[in-house]
Image (cartoon, grey):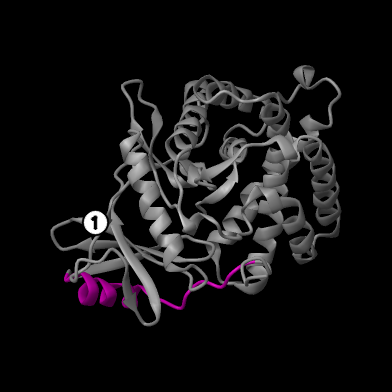
Amino acid sequence: MTEQQAGGLVRPEVSETDAATIARECYGIEASAHELGSNQDRNFVLLEADGRRSVLRVDNPVFDDAARDAQHAALEAYRAAGVAVPSVLPGLDGALVQRWGGFAVRRSEFAEGEPMVDSGYFAPVVVEEFGVLAAASVNALAGLRHEGLEREQMWDMRVAYEQTLQLAPAITDTELREQVLGWAAGAHAALSLVSADLPVQAIHGDLTDDNVMARMGDDARLHPHTVLDLGDLSMGWRVAELAVTASSLLHHDAERPLRLLDAIAAFHREAPLSESEARAVWPLIVLRSTLLVASGWRQLEIDGDNDYARERIEGSRPSLMRLLLCRSSRRPSRCSRC
């Protein structure tokens, strides 16, 4: 079992000052650095004097070159399919991956727009567009084959139940811990009825509102546009791409969790779900939510200064509670919260 499967990763010890040094030594640019949030890596926005911006990523040492090469291949597959993604920028020696202080680093184009995670309420059309984007992702990656995709990682939904059990002891709120374990067990039982029939392929694995940049439309709404952060790219259940995306939409209208059906229907139009996949969607959404809560507590246990993880914990619990309140209703279509 790798360190990641053991329950979270401590981020590389790389500061904003270090990031500016990397920019100069590896990429030949003078830039200030401002750190972005991450659970397991370090990400920085680099700002040059003329206003140009780019993003520097310092990978956690557990990730190898094969995984990075697979991510680069996935970026090409996305571009070929018309899915907007930022390009990786070569260093002074022409290589996409640079080495600094024992870490692998990469610099990418800055994705213009607004982060969807901060957008508040999502109109129905935006929820549908997330479903379309998840379908575009699985369609683009369906034919991708690479040795770097065959890796064990805690966000693979095929092991989400086991990971939740392993991480749950970090939840110090006893009531919440018992609820998370109960919900996870119920979802696992439902999923086990169809899991053997779920197609497996390359998936993004973390196609959430946190990893999608938006563009302003003519309707004065922000619409999902550019896909970011392929750090969780691997083989996985195709339907897990949809479930992960859908679960990230919960906090944008937590009072009405069944609005996720708009995203699910949109995905189905573009990438038709089998009956087994359709039956797997809801338990996968529940498992993703329980895993997020458990992993967030574990991340703070091993990396207490990670404000990003702390904010995600604070945002995930209300959405999970609303989701499970509606899930427990015998007739969810008449649930007043939906």
**Which residues, given as a range, are shown in magenta?**
8-28
Point out residue 166 in the picture as x, y percentages from the top left corner: 77, 63
Residue depicted at 72% across the width and 41% down the height: 286
Closer to the camera, 27 or 29? 27
Badge 1: few (under 14), some or many (20 or more) residues near its Cα, within 10 Å? some
Residue depicted at 62% across the width and 52% down the height: 156
Task: Please give left or right for residue 155 compared with residue 210 in the image.
Answer: right
Residue depicted at 39% across the width and 27% down the height: 221
Closer to the camera, 171 or 106? 106
Of the 4 image quadrants, the one containing the C terminus is: top right
Point out residue 51 in the picture as x, y percentages from the top left corner: 17, 56
Residue type for callout 1: Arg
Of helix, strand and loop, which one carries label 1? strand
Task: Please give left or right for residue 199 compared with residue 326 in the image.
Answer: left
Point out residue 109 in the picture as x, y percentages from the top left corner: 27, 53
Using the rendered image of the protein, determine whether residue 309 is visible from the camera's viewpoint. Answer: yes
Q: Is residue 226 magenta?
A: no
In this view, which residue lies farthest toward the left? 50
